[in-house]
Amino acid sequence: MKEITLIPGDGIGTEVTAAVQKVLTAANQSIAWEIVNGGEGAYQATGQYIPDALLDSISTNKIAFKGPITTPIGKGFKSINVTLRQKYNTFANVRPVKSMEGIKTPFNNVDLVIIRENSEDLYCGIEHLVTEGVAESIKVITEKASLRIGEYAFQYAKKHGRNKVTSVHKANIMKISDGLFLDCIRRVAKKYPEIEYEEVIVDNMCMQLVMYPEKYDVLVLPNLYGDIVSDLAAGLVGGLGLVPGANIGEDIAIFEAVHGSAPQIAGKNEANPTACILSAAMMLDYINERSAADLIREAVAYVIREGKHTTKDIGGNATTEEMTEAICSYIRTVSINAAG
Ligand code: NAD
């Protein structure tokens, strides 16, 4: 039985990670979940924001599924999400964004993958008050991390039969830091002549995406632009309730949706479980359970296309639990038919 660390997280985290557990059970995945938590709740229980038990569990299991964790704004402890990504060197944040039949948006032809550098940039958290009224935040871009994410993006494109990689930057203004990022991606691009390569300045990228999203395939971005463009791209396909993600390192991977803890809807049984369930499908791909992953994606697509058991954010009136049950029911029916 595969042991996987489960971090339920805050806000809607417990609701959407419970959905993942149910769906993986329906898909016959026998997983021994090791449940540990971090953040404010963990601090109250253990006196640590990231309890040793959580770190030990990820170090041992090497795979974690994580719900969103609330990070205090403008004060308080450092983001647990960023800390885990840095500690485990999960350098590539992979976020596939795809239109789904049954979702009403101005676009039905989005199919792009965001590859966000996950370890540095302004997320290093090096900031200080120079003097009263003057604050400084340091953006760190290194050749090592930029070459590594470039290589990951082109390898990803090659492996998944994608034709184009677009690097997104602001090197017209940050000539040295974003200039280094761009130079590294260009160097990697030269090794992959079969894959089209282009560069777009991040502000133009935002406009291009909301006008011509179909033109884009794989995007590679430094950390901050990757974070912002991910939410913009989620908006193109129906919102944050739909977009999955993975944090991939050399030998450790942490799977989590793009969305946060959505405190406004927490505890109301309203959250869309899709983003987390599709993140779980990415996790199954990672452990080579490809057919179960495909079945889960098929079930999600069916339930959304049918539109009878979908959550409020995508126009339905089902609860989180009802939508999850509809997905499980599809999986069970297909599995029984296949067996019998
Ligand atoms: P958010 O993603 O939590 O919510 C943004 C909007 O999307 C809200 O309107 C919310 O209701 C909606 N939404 C998000 N997920 C949804 C779902 N599954 N179903 C339906 N609607 C959904 O972003 P925020 O409000 O900016 O952040 C809230 C908290 O989450 C903050 O503390 C932030 O730091 C944290 N956060 C954590 C992560 C993470 O753990 N990886 C990621 C992003 C934000």
Image: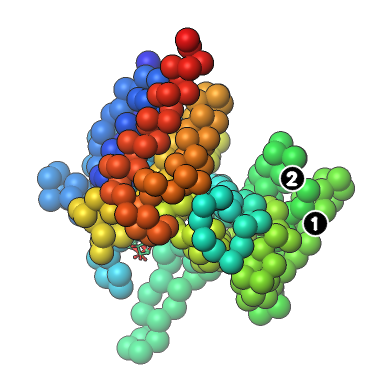
Look at 51% across and 37% down and name the residue there: 297
Give the class, few, some or many, for how many residues have Cα within 10 Å of label 2's Cα (few <14, many ≥20).
some
Mark 2 sits near ligand 1, with its Cβ under 8 Å away: no
Q: Secondary structure at mark 1?
A: strand
Q: Position of residue 123 (x, y in %)?
A: 46, 62
In the visual, does 87 lie left or right of 43?
A: right
Q: Which residue is mark 2?
A: 162
Callout in the foreground (2, 1): 2
Mark with earlier residue (2, 1):
2
**What is the total number of numbered labels drawn onto the structure image?**
2
Nearer the observer, 159 or 140? 159
Q: Is residue 263 above or below residue 63?
A: below
Look at 78% across and 62% down and name the residue there: 198
Q: Residue flagged by tag 1: what amino acid is it?
A: Tyr
In the visual, does 3 lie left or right of 159?
A: left
Q: Which residue is mark 1?
A: 197
Q: Position of residue 47 (x, y in %)?
A: 15, 48
Q: Secondary structure at mark 2?
A: loop
Look at 28% across and 38% down and name the residue there: 18
